[in-house]
Image (cartoon, grey):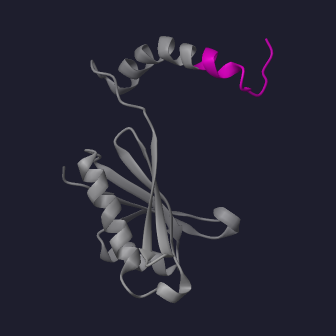
Amino acid sequence: MDIRSADLIDVRKLNQFREAEWPEVDERHFDNKELVDFDEQELTFVAQDNEEICGYIKMRTEMSVCFIESLIVGKNFRNQGIAKSLVKKVEETCKEMNLHKISLETGVEWEARKLYEKLGYKTICELKDHYGHKDFVLMEKNLEV
């Protein structure tokens, strides 16, 4: 047996392999008679003032869970409610997509953590010595759908 990095030639074979093998694994792991939807989507929402981008939020979905991957507001546009509006847009989109949870990671002492807490996100755990050897938190919010 040889173990190697997958390449572009493997893509078609990997898709066929997954389609053939996953249904049994899906039923065994998730106890579903209906298969779980593993289609991932990435969406990015942009806040714009006239022609200038003020900020953005990027989300990824998987198995009815949303992951907020990044949220940035430009330094000249902070403290104007843009970040809150971007997070609310993600929440609305998640509800439309029938997602049940939003998850994210943020720095323990970052301003964003305070925003997320005000919006109802709960700290699930601390991630010590995480990205760049800094402490982070994993936060979640369950959605009513």
Residue 107 in which image quadrant: bottom right
Residue 117: x, y in percent? 35, 74
Q: Write the residue at 42% across / 71% down.
A: 47
Quadrant placement of the N terminus? top right
Q: Nearer the viewer, residue 120 or 97?
A: 97
* Residue 73 on image: x %, y %: 50, 77
Can you give x and y, in whole percent of width and height, for residue 129 in the image?
65, 65
Magenta run includes residue 6: yes
Determine whether, in the image, residue 79 is placed left or right of residue 73.
left
Quarter holding residue 13: top right
Q: Which of 142 and 82 is in front in this view?
A: 82
Residue drawn at the location 40% of the way across and 25% of the way down: 29
The residues colored magenta run 1-14
Magenta span dominant secondary structure? loop
Task: Give the left or right position of residue 4, taking residue 59 as reference.
Answer: right
Task: Measuring from the top left, give residue 114's x and y in whole percent.
Answer: 40, 79
Query: Is residue 102 toward the left or the right of residue 69 in the image?
Result: left
Above or below residue 45? Residue 51 is: below
Q: Residue at x 39, y 50 (%)?
A: 66
Q: Residue furthest left?
A: 145
Q: How many marks?
A: 0
Of 127 and 4, the residue lying toward us: 4
Which of the 4 image quarters holds residue 90? bottom left
